[in-house]
Image (tube, grey):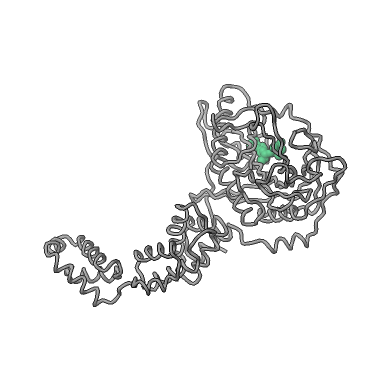
Amino acid sequence: MLDLTYDAPKPKVISGATGDWELVIGLEVHAQVATAAKLFSGASTQFGAEPNSNVAFVDAGMPGMLPVINEGCVAQAVRTGLGLKAEINLWSAFDRKNYFYPDLPQGYQISQLYHPIVGEGEVLVELGNGTARLVRIERIHLEQDAGKSIHDMDPAMSFVDLNRTGVALMEIVSRPDIRGPEEAAAYVGKLRQIMRYLGTCDGNMQNGNLRADVNVSVCRPGDYEKYQATQDFGHLGTRCEIKNMNSMRFIQMAIEYEARRQIALLEDGKSVTQETRLYDPDKNETRSMRSKEEAHDYRYFPDPDLLPLEIEQAWVDDIAASLPELPDAKKARFIADFGLSDYDASVLTAESENAAYFETVADGRDGKLAANWVINELFGRLKKEGHDITQSPVSPAQLGGIIALISSGDISGKIAKDLFEIVYTEGGDPAKIVEDRGMKQVTDTGAIEAAVDAVIAENPAQVEKAKQNPKLAGWFVGQVMKATGGKANPAAVNALVLQKLGL
Ligand code: ADP
Ligand code: MG
């Protein structure tokens, strides 16, 4: 595999009245596990179901009901851990985090504070300008989601929907290795991409499948390097945590706002209070929600209803053996095997379905040409109609057929676009369409020569001009192409025009 090497990106620097400040960011990403049933019950996880229709007795906190771990959720967490090159803990345990919410009828959330199922891992975050940063993962633990309280449907009443109560979440905690708003968004994007490849999380941010708590602090240049050398958090500033962000754009705006708020405080001689804040997109500001000082005592303790979770190495090995090729490896292979640019390889590997489509098109053909057609023509056309690759009316075999016709010289690039349009709207076998509709490129020099001679004979004034200024030869090429309905081989036309004009 080709080794992709990147430069380290620079941290975001904000200049204040007293000098420069750098940003330090750590994310806690909550990813909904893609499974049919909840973490500790058999109730369905289907999104958009009738309120309170996907609720088992244990989800509703009925007395005497016992949680039973869903093996599928455990497998998905292990799979995600392996995809993030993380350590898998064969022994983990569930704790109760006690708090009251109307949409959490148990009165506690079952989580894994002390012994998470996944330990340290890493994610390569590329920034699209030839730079990338390796962000360390601290841990991933499994936990239950809460339900939903609805306060805006009735002026006097609030409603509770327990469909989401007990759905499995993976909380993926990063080290504070992220150094700017764009990096934070790129990190979430990369996690999302990896989990979609793995099939462990749908990553639909609008549906709340993927949400992030964003921790932000600021420090002076040089402090972060001291933290890196010692892992001593004392070198970093006090952080604030912005809760529950489910939009890449808002994550970036909230970080920017929060960093500037902290800098203003510090430059004013005040200090940052460690607290949880909420971002208000309408006002583009963060507001205090609760301070960490008076933070609730969650009274974590091991859940007595659940035995520690023990898994076997052989089971983990089976899951490891079933992992698909992941984005970094696929991208490196596309660059090495097809000679693609870093950018094209990134676009084509963004989703595994796109990558699979491209590979079928490019198989045994010119990879760069295939990449151009997939990205510019096909993706461009699909995007215009709001479709994704799975809805493409053009199959990889059909697009491959068009590319084969270009490579063999049977059709010109211009005709190929017309052909693509026909295949896109009407379907059919490209080679047969070309044959039936007489779209073949004219490479027969005799026919081209006749067309060139005719254009030259009809335009004596232009001929004189072109003899003074050879750049005007292009005009003749254009005329011949027009006269032949775009079917003449442009290279052959060009050569003949130059020859006949004596240039
Ligand atoms: P808690 O559970 O109280 O939120 P954690 O120790 O689990 O605390 O940390 C939560 C997140 O905060 C992690 O992603 C971590 O990287 C990040 N973090 C810790 N210190 C800082 C800091 N000084 N600046 C920015 N992020 C930080
Ligand atoms: Mg936290």
Residue at screen point 77% across, 55% down: 71
**The residue positioned farthest toward the top in the image shown:** 269
> In this rendering, would 64 be left or right of 244?
right
Q: Quarter of the picture for ligand 1? A: top right
Query: Above or below — where is 284 with respect to 489?
Result: above
- In which quadrant will I find the N terminus? bottom right
Residue 267, position as x, y percentages in the image = 56, 24
> In this rendering, would 197 be left or right of 484?
right
Regarding residue 139, the answer to whether it shows in the image is: no
Image quadrant assignment for residue 228: top right
Total marks placed = 0
Image quadrant assignment for residue 269: top right
Residue 424, position as x, y percentages in the image = 44, 62
Residue 359, position as x, y percentages in the image = 52, 65
Regarding residue 382, the answer to whether it shows in the image is: yes
Query: Above or below — where is 358 with respect to 263?
Result: below
Image quadrant assignment for residue 274: top right
> In this rendering, would 499 be left or right of 460?
right
Please state which of residues 355 and 346 is positioned toward the viewer in this rendering: 355
Please state which of residues 182 and 193 is positioned toward the viewer in this rendering: 193
